[in-house]
Image (cartoon, helix red, strand yellow):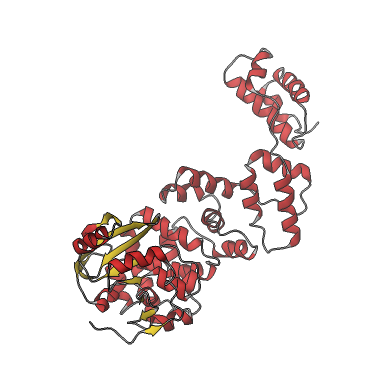
Amino acid sequence: MNDPPATRIDPPPFQADPDLARVMDALPGSRIVGGAVRDVLARRAVADIDLATPWPPDRVDAALRGVGIRTVATGIAHGTITAVTGGRRFEVTTLRRDVETDGRHAVVAFTEDWRADAERRDFTMNALSMARDGAVFDYFCGLADLAAGRVRFVGDAAERIAEDYLRVLRFFRFHARYGRTEPDEATRAALRDGAAGLSRLSIERVWYELARLLSAPDPVEAVRSMAALGVLARVLPEGADPGALSALVAGGGPNDPVLRLAALLLDGSAEAAALRLKLSSADRERLIALSATSPPALADDDAELRRALANAEPAIVLGASWRRGPYTKAADGLRARIAAMARPVLPLDGKTIVAMGVPAGPAVGRLLAAVRRRWVAGGCVASRADCEADARRLASVSDAEVSRMPLRD
C-alpha cells in the first residue's frame, strides 16, 4: 500500500459513534471517505458517512451479515453496498480505479490500492480518508487546500473534467461552499473549455448541481466566476444577471435555490427556464410566480400590500420582498406586516353571479373578473354586498363600457 504519513486528529471525530463503530469493526481496515471527512475537518455539520474498503463486495456483504447488520445492494456493479444499523445507512464501497471514461460515466475495476482510489476523485479535499482512530490519509495536499479555501482538482484539471463534465458544475458548487481563493489560470482555462461538455449531461443533473450551488450561504462570487468563464450561459441560456442575485444575498434573503434562481434569471424568462430545467410542478409554479411578482416597497400602505396578497400567495410576496436589498430593519418590518396580514379573498363567486340572472358561461367569468379588478383597485376591502351591487351594475352595461369605467368609484 502506498500511503503517505497520516495526520492524526485528536480526539478522533468519529470515535463516539456506536453505529459507525459496529460497521467498521465488521470491516477491519475500512476508512471514512468523502464529504464526511471534508466536513468534519472544516468544522461543518456532517450529513451522511460513507466508507471505503479494500475488500470486494461479496466479502463486505458476508462480513456485515455475519454480525447481524442488514445490507442493501444499492450499487453492486460499482462496488457499493449499504449497511443499515441503528436506523442509519452507511454506504460501503470497494476501492476502485477507472478503466475507461466517456465524459460522464466510468468503467471501474476493484483495487486494494488506496492511492489509486483517491486518484479518481475530483478535488483534493474530497480525496481524504480517515481511520476511526482519527488518522487522516492525504495523498494530494487536500488538508492544506481545505485550510486555505482552495478547490483544486486531483491531477490535471482538463483531464479530470474530460473524464466527467459534471465536474465543471461541481467545481463551482464546492467553490461556493469552501472556496476563499481564486482558481489558477490552468483551472480557469479547463473550466472554460469544459463548459461545452455540459450539453452531454442530463438536464435533471444540471438542475441538481445548480440548486445545491444556489443553496450555499453566499454563491455570488461562484456565479460571477461561472459567468466570466462562459459556464453560466451554458447553464442558463435564457440569460442571467448575477447582480440581481448579489442584491438578494446582500439583502439577507434565505438560502432558497428557487428564490435565488428567480432573482438570477432575466425578466420574462422564468417559464422557459423552468421547462428546460424540468423543475417539479411545485418549483416551476413558484419560480414563475416569484419572477412575476414585483417586490413590495417600504412605502407601501396596507391597501397596497393587500393588493399584492390578493394576486399572489403570502409566501410569494414575502419571497419577492427579499429582492429589494440591502438588508434594513425597515425591510424586516415590512415582512412582519405582510406575515401578519390575512390573504384577502374576493367575497363573490360564480354561483352568485348566475343567481343574479347572468347565463352560465363565459359572461360569468368576464363579470367576475371585472368585479375583482375593481375590488383589488379599492384595496380589497369592499364587502360582499358592495361586490354584489357592483356586479349588478356591471351586468347591465357592455364589456366595452366596463373597460372604460374607472377602477375606483
Residue drawn 58% across and 49% down? 290
Nearest the viewer among 132 and 299 is 132
Nearest the viewer among 290 and 176 is 176
Q: Position of residue 126 (x, y in %)?
A: 37, 73
Nearest the viewer among 293 and 339 is 339
For the view shown, which residue lies furthest in the top direction?
357
**Relative height, residue 14 to residue 370 (above, below):** below
Q: Position of residue 233 (x, y in %)?
A: 44, 62
Which quadrant is home to the N terminus?
A: bottom left
Q: Position of residue 363 (x, y in %)?
A: 61, 20
Residue 314 placement: quadrant = top right
Residue drawn 33% across and 59% down? 199
Residue 394 placement: quadrant = top right
Nearest the viewer among 25 and 224 is 25
For the view shown, which residue lies furthest in the front direction?
67
Residue drawn 29% across and 57% down? 68
Residue 381 placement: quadrant = top right
